[in-house]
Amino acid sequence: MEPVEVRVAAAESVDIDQLAALAACTFPLACPPSVTAENIASFVDAHLSVARFAEYLADPQRVILVAAHGNRLVGYAMLVSGVGDDADVQRAVSIRPAVELSKMYVLPDSHGMGVSTALIAAAIDAAAESGADCIWLGVNQQNQRAQRFYRKHGFSVTGTRTFQLGTRRENDYVMVRQFPRGPRRSAPAAVTWPANTSSGNRRPASPD
């Protein structure tokens, strides 16, 4: 497919309804075939509702980026400051401070158009500019397509974790991309999102 021009910017309250619909549509794409529709629906209701996205947007420890083609949202990513309490993740992510790429999804009809590339580039930039020394994520061990994509963008497997999906416990790889240390990096104890995260930027997407 031909690359398209995609605008990647921080989500705003007016995006919440579209965000929730986008999340409900795209989350099943990352699930292995063994996951039941009931478990997917349970997760969506608990974590990807309009009410939950309103909470996420109000949380200063999170940033949601949206990719838009014209007036239509075609993808989103969510960054979360820190590593959390999971012992497996804490072992796998030894570099601190860290930012988690908690979610990144693109609509099926926008695959291959460079949207994922634009989104992850913006997510990596935002994490690096926040003062973090690395960005990390969890990816299902059966999702080889996503693993290849993340490796292409500098991530490597550093450990494993389990992920509760409804009544089922899934197995993830933990992948980390370390940022180069330099004079501008002061390794603060916590990250602070840069002011320009909310201004967005327009970047032509390259093919995924």
Image (cartoon, rainbow, N blue to C red):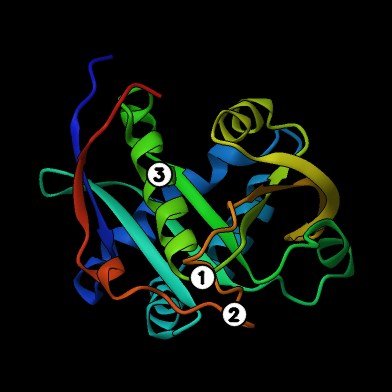
Q: What residue does disc 2 label?
A: 188
Does the image show residue 132?
yes
**5 to the left or right of 92:** left
Name the residue at 78% across, 37% down.
141
Mark sitting earlier along the chain (1/3)? 3
Secondary-structure class at tag 2 = loop
Secondary-structure class at tag 3 = helix
State whether residue 43 is above or below residue 68: below
Q: What residue does disc 3 label?
A: 121
Q: Between residue 156 and residue 114, name the one nearer to us.
A: 156
Q: Looking at the rendering, in which quadrant would you find the C terminus?
A: top left
Binning the other alpha carbons within 10 Å of mark 3 as few (below 14), some (14 to 19) or many (20 upward) gives: some
In this view, the mark in front (1 or 3): 1
Amino acid type at mark 3: Ala
Q: Quadrant of residue 98?
A: bottom right
Does the image show residue 35?
no
Marks 3/2: CA distance?
Answer: 22 Å
Amino acid type at mark 2: Pro
Q: Between residue 87 and residue 37, name the one nearer to us.
A: 87
Amino acid type at mark 1: Gly
Q: What residue does disc 1 label?
A: 131
